[in-house]
Amino acid sequence: MKNSIIILNPAYYLRNDIHRAIIGTFEFPDMGTGHYVPHFLYSIHPFIAQLLSFFSSNNGKPLEQIKNEIACFFQLSIEQVTGIIQPMINNNSPLIKEFNGNKMVLPAYLLISSDKTRKETYSPNDFIIEGDIDLSTVRLYRPIHAVLELTMRCLTDCIYCYADKRGHGNDYLPTDTAIRFIKDAKKNRFVDIEINGGEVMMHPGIDSILKELAYCGYYSLISTKIPLQEDKIAFLKKIGMTRVQLSLDSLNSTKTSTLLNVDKNYLSKLRQTMQLLDQYEFNWQINTVLTKHNCNIKDVQEQIIEISNYSHLKGIKFTPVGYPMYKDAHAFEDLHPSVEQISSVREYLNSVTLGKPSYWLVMADEERADNYKCKKWETFEQRSLCTANQKAFNVLPDGQVTICEELYWNPHFIIGDINQNSIMEIWNSEKAKNLFFVQNDYFSNQSNCYSCNKLRDCRLNKGVCWKMVIMAYGDEHWDYPDPRCPEAPIPYNKFYV
């Protein structure tokens, strides 16, 4: 390995987080078939980030040369440097480090032998930290991710729509405001920016916004229900925006019309778009929302047969319909498939996947009643980390900022306005901090959180899903416990099967 080219895995990024460094995984790593740990994010000592920065250059330095540079920078011997970095090279499991009683985790496949190039390089000077080192606070000192809700406009009128369009159906974020925010996010070293809606391709300035995103290195996934014409696809290809997700719920035109409220020509136009995306070699995928109308083997099988004709389709994600918070209270009951329907489709997909097709077939988990009726502490403690207000925020079409895309204009979660506040002013606002570093007296005495002695550990670590709280108990009880918590009451609303 003496003359090997070893680089920091291109799937991972480093950031200076004011009182520490962080290491994480890019949302869409450009890695081919390389190994990496998805959705990774951890605080590390800045010295480790400085060391790793020596492996971020793309000029192909031999390992021995890098060792010499590290030894010179840290005033260490070559033997000491070798002992530090050897476990990091081609490691197939995470590495655990410790500093002042705080655990640091480094991901598997950290330093790899590769001829790949990185899209980002770093200098040791990027990770000079003044003041105390903090490796315990979960919330980042500066955000690294944002979702721009560009518009609430839509071409379709999906019967399962989860968006809050009440009074906002024609809203869109002004183009110059969106571009100004993207530039500011770039200066603040955001890792990525998502675009969402509504239907992003109906924004009047979408071409200019996409150009700015691409110029700043944010190659966002474009999720759309619009049948795209060839000129638009050629434009996207030219600027490098080749990640597209199409919504396709059924190949049955009658069902498609029922689900999306579109005309009979919609499906044929969408097929033309699929053919063009493949022709232009896009990295494209399909999302299918499963309702009682299309959650069956016949519909799913038709889609799988159809996609076998495409060379560049990456896969299909099947998602059981979620609880539409901003629709009629009975909408979910009228839409969701039965447990039997979901189980039969899942079994079928598992059988197809055994054949190892060239594309992936994924089925998201549905919300099951047991998660909310037979609750246990050990299960609750294994929940996923909520990244809302932990590393990210969402910009609404009028410029107001909320912590979660599905909370929209709920006033309890608005933490700023990009028309009036800078990114760091929003992130450090009293409202944002109070929501994350929440105290017992923040809650009403009707909430079990008001007197819970586990609140600090619960909220300051993995947090809770505020959206799920409102789904379960209604907006008037937004401060109730997460419905998965053993101290939470049985949900008032049925959002599970």
Image (spheres, grey):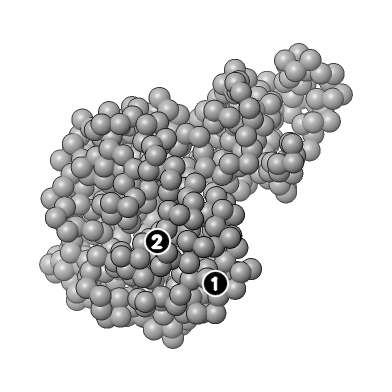
**Residue found at the very far bottom of the displayed protein:** 340
> On the image, which quarter does residue 258 sit in?
bottom left
Residue shown at the point (28%, 34%) measured from the top left:
418
The spot of residue 399 in percent (x, y) is 24, 39
Question: What residue is at 25 percent from the left and 78 percent from the top?
Answer: 330
Picture quadrant where residue 274 is located: bottom left
Label 2 or label 1, whichever comes before in sequence order: 2
Residue 212 relative to residue 383: left or right: left
Query: Dot 2, crowdedness within 10 Å: few (<14), some or many (≥20)?
Result: some
Tell me the residue at 58%/60% (across/down): 453
Res 185 visible: yes
Residue 486, label in figure: 1
Give the number of the mark in front: 2 or 1. 2
Q: Residue 171: x and y, percent?
A: 16, 47
Q: Residue at x 16, y 52 (%)?
A: 168
Label at residue 444 = 2
Residue type marked 1 = Pro
Residue 47 at what x, y percent from top left?
A: 69, 26
| Amino acid type, residue under disc 2 in the picture | Ser
- Kind of element beneath mark 1: loop
